Amino acid sequence: MKWLEWLPGLRPPPAIADRAWRKALATHPLAQRLSTVDQKQLRLLVARFLQHKRFHPIDFNLDATQRLLIAMQACIPILHMGFRALRGWQGVVVYPGEFKVRHRHHDAATGVLTEGDQILSGEAWQLGPLVLSWATVQQDLERPWDGHNVVAHEIAHKLDMLDGPPDGVPPLPRGVSWRAWIDTFQRAYNRLATDVNRGHATIIDPYAATNAGEYFAVTSELHFSDPRQLERAEPGVAGLLRGYYGPSPAP
Ligand SMILES: [Zn+2]
C-alpha cells in the first residue's frame, strides 16, 4: 500500500455488501423510489459517508443497518450535489430517543442571558456534529410521507452553514437564481409569520416561522416527505427546492 492511500480522503471507500444494501433498502421508502441510476449513486455516496463520518451512539448499540439507514437519509438530499456538500464536519451523535439540551443565549444589545432546556429530536452545529434521535429517524422511515424528516432537516442546516451562520440561503448551484431565492423565500416566510401571529392554521409547520434558517430546513423536510403539500402552500418555494435538491423522490 502506498503511503498516500492511508489518507482517508484518497482511499476509495469499502463497497457496501449486496446483502446489507438490500436489507437497508427494504426498509427505506425514499431510497426505494429512486431510479436504478440514482440508487447506484446513493450507494457510492453512502459508502463515502460511512468511511468519513464517525458515529457516536449515546448509551445504546447502533448496529450496522441503523448506521446504513442514517447514512442513506443523509445522502439523499445531496444526491445531485456530490459528497463535498457534507464537508466540514465528521461526527454523527445518535441518542436512542429525544434528548435534552441546555441552551444559553447572550443578547449583546440588552445584556440578557437566556438559558433553558429544550427537548430535541435533532440538532446541527456549524462545524460540529449532526445530532439525531434514533427513535425519530425510525419514525420517519415508518411514516415517510407525513411531512417530517429529521435527517433532511438537519442536513439542510448543514448545507445552509457551508457559507456561514444559517440564514436560509445555502450556496446555490448554477441555474438557481440567488435573487429569486431571496425574494421568494422572504415573501413566503412573511406570509407564514403573519398567519402564525394571527393564529391561523398553516400547511407549513409554524416552527418554520422561527427564522429564515428554520424555514429552509422545515420546507426541505416537506420536499422529501410531502412535496404536494409544499406545492399547495408555496409553489415558488417548492420550485426552488426542486432546482436545488433535484426532483423529490417522494410521491
Ligand atoms: Zn432546525
Image (cartoon, rainbow, N blue to C red):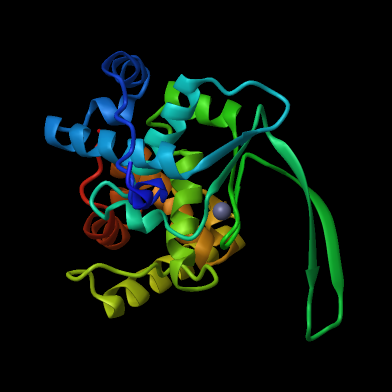
Q: Residue placed farthest to the bottom in the image?
A: 109
Place of residue 190 in the rendered image (x, y in percent of width and height, measured from the top left): 47, 70
Would residue 174 be visible to someone looking at this image? Answer: yes
Quarter of the image for the C terminus: give it. Answer: top left
Residue 107 lies in what quarter of the image? bottom right
The residue at the point 50 percent across, 71 percent down is: 167
Quarter of the image for the N terminus: give it. Answer: top left
Residue 176 lies in what quarter of the image? bottom left
Place of residue 200 in the rendered image (x, y in percent of width and height, measured from the top left): 54, 53
The residue at the point 34 percent across, 77 percent down is: 183
157 left or right, relative to 2: right
Residue 174 lies in what quarter of the image? bottom left
User: Quick check: 196 above or below 55?
Assistant: below
Q: Residue placed farthest to the front in the image?
A: 2
141 left or right, relative to 129: left
User: Quick check: 239 above or below 136?
Assistant: below
Q: Of 82 and 12, which appears nearest the observer? A: 12
145 left or right, relative to 165: left
Place of residue 188 in the rendered image (x, y in percent of width and height, measured from the top left): 40, 66
Would residue 191 be visible to someone looking at this image? Answer: no
40 left or right, relative to 95: left
Place of residue 228 in the rendered image (x, y in percent of width and height, measured from the top left): 28, 42
The residue at the point 32 percent across, 25 percent down is: 29
| Label total for image | 0
